[in-house]
Amino acid sequence: MKKNVKTLFVLVLMALMALMSACSSASESSNGSTGQENSDDKLKIGLTVGTLANPFFVAMGKGAEEAGKELGAEVLVESAEYDLSKQTSQIENFITKKVDVILLNAVDTKGIAAAVQQAKDAGIPVIAVDTNADGGVNATVTSDNYQAGKLAGEYVVEQLNGKGNIVIIDGPPVSAVTDRIQGFEDVIKESGIKVAAKQNGEGNREKALSVMESILQANPSGSIDAVFAINDPEAIGVEIASEQAGRKDEFFIVGVDGAPEAAEAMAKEGSSIMATSAQSPSEMVKKAVEIGMKVKNGEDVEELIKVPVKLVTQDTLDSYQGW
C-alpha cells in the first residue's frame, strides 16, 4: 500500500513539473524572448513640414524616408498646412508614439516653442529643418537662407542696373523667410531700387496669385520692373497673375528653391521667371536625420548647420541637376 502511494506521489509531482515548464515556455514566447525582435523596438523618426502641397517639402519627405530606410527606421511624415495648432498636435502625436527623433519644419518659429519643450521634456531630440524654432531644439539644419536672398538681390540689381521699382512677395513668419528677405533687402538698399509693394503670399501659388493680382491693379502698367518671391510656388503664382493681366513682358521674377516646377517653367520660351536660388531639401533632411541620431546617442553636435545654395538662371539651367 505504501509503495503504491509513493508511486502515485512521484507521478503527480512529475505532472506538476511538466505543467510548470509548459507555462514558462508559453510566457517566454508571449513576451518575445524567443529571439525575435519586438516591433516596438523599431527606430521611429517623425517629420512635420509646412505643407506637402509644396514640392520642396515632398522632396524633404522622400529624403527622410530614404535616410530612414538606411537606418531600418519607420518614418512618419505629416503636413501641417501652415497651421500652428495642427503642427502642435502632430508633435504631441509623435510624443505619444514614442518616436526616437523629431524633425521639425516649423510653421511659426516662436509659436511652436511650447510643443518643442513638450518633446524635450519627453526626452526626444528635436532637430529644426529649413527654419529654426524656439523652445530649445537640439540643432538646426537649414539652407543658407540669407545667402539665398542675397544672391536673388544681386541678380535683380545687376539686371536693373541698380534702379527701378520692384515688388516683394513675402511669406510665413519663419526664420527661413525672414532671412531671405533680409539678405535681399540688404543688397538692394545700397542701390536706387525702390520697393513699390510688399505683401504676404503665404508661401503658396494660389495666395501669391491673388496678392499679385491686387498689386497689379494698384500699380499701372509699366510701373513694375521685377518681383522677388520668397519661394518658387509664389514665383509661379506671380507669373500666372501677370499672364492673366496681360503684363507678362513688363517685369521678371526671381524665386527661391530650385523646384522642379520652377525649372520647367524657366525652360519655356518667354518665361518671366528668370532665376531661383536653389536649395537641396533631400540632402538637408538627410543631414538632419544624421544629426538627430547623434543627439540620440549622446554625441555633441553643432547647433547650426547651414547648407550652401546657388543661383540658377535661365542661362545656367541646362547644367542644373535639380532635386
Image: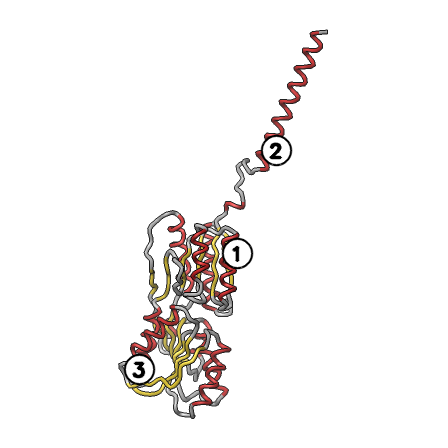
Q: Quadrant of the N terminus?
A: top right
Q: State which tag comes first along the sequence, 2 or 3.
A: 2
Question: Quick check: can you spot residue 263?
Answer: no
Q: Distance between the residues labelled 3 and 1?
A: 47 Å
Circle 2 packing at 10 Å, graded few (<14), some (14-19), many (20+), is few
Dot 2: element: helix
Residue 119 badge: none
Question: Quick check: can you spot residue 39?
Answer: yes
Q: Kindly identify the amino acid type of the residue bearing the numbered disc 2.
A: Ala
Indicate the position of residue 87 as horizontal and vertical percent values: 49, 63
Query: What count of labels does the image hold?
Result: 3
Indicate the position of residue 265 as horizontal and vertical percent values: 45, 78
Q: Which of the two discs, 2 and 3, sits closer to the camera? A: 2
**In this figure, which residue is indicated by the disc labeled 3?**
157
Q: How far apart are marks 1 and 2 (CA)?
A: 34 Å
Q: In which quarter of the image is the C terminus?
A: bottom left
* Left or right of residue 39, residue 157 in this image: left
**In this figure, which residue is indicated by the disc labeled 1?**
93
Residue 123 in the image: above or below residue 26: below
**In this figure, which residue is indicated by the disc labeled 2?**
26
Q: Kindly identify the amino acid type of the residue bearing the numbered disc 1.
A: Asn
Q: Distance between the residues labelled 2 and 3?
A: 76 Å
Q: Which colour scheme is used?
A: secondary structure
Q: Kindly identify the amino acid type of the residue bearing the numbered disc 3.
A: Val
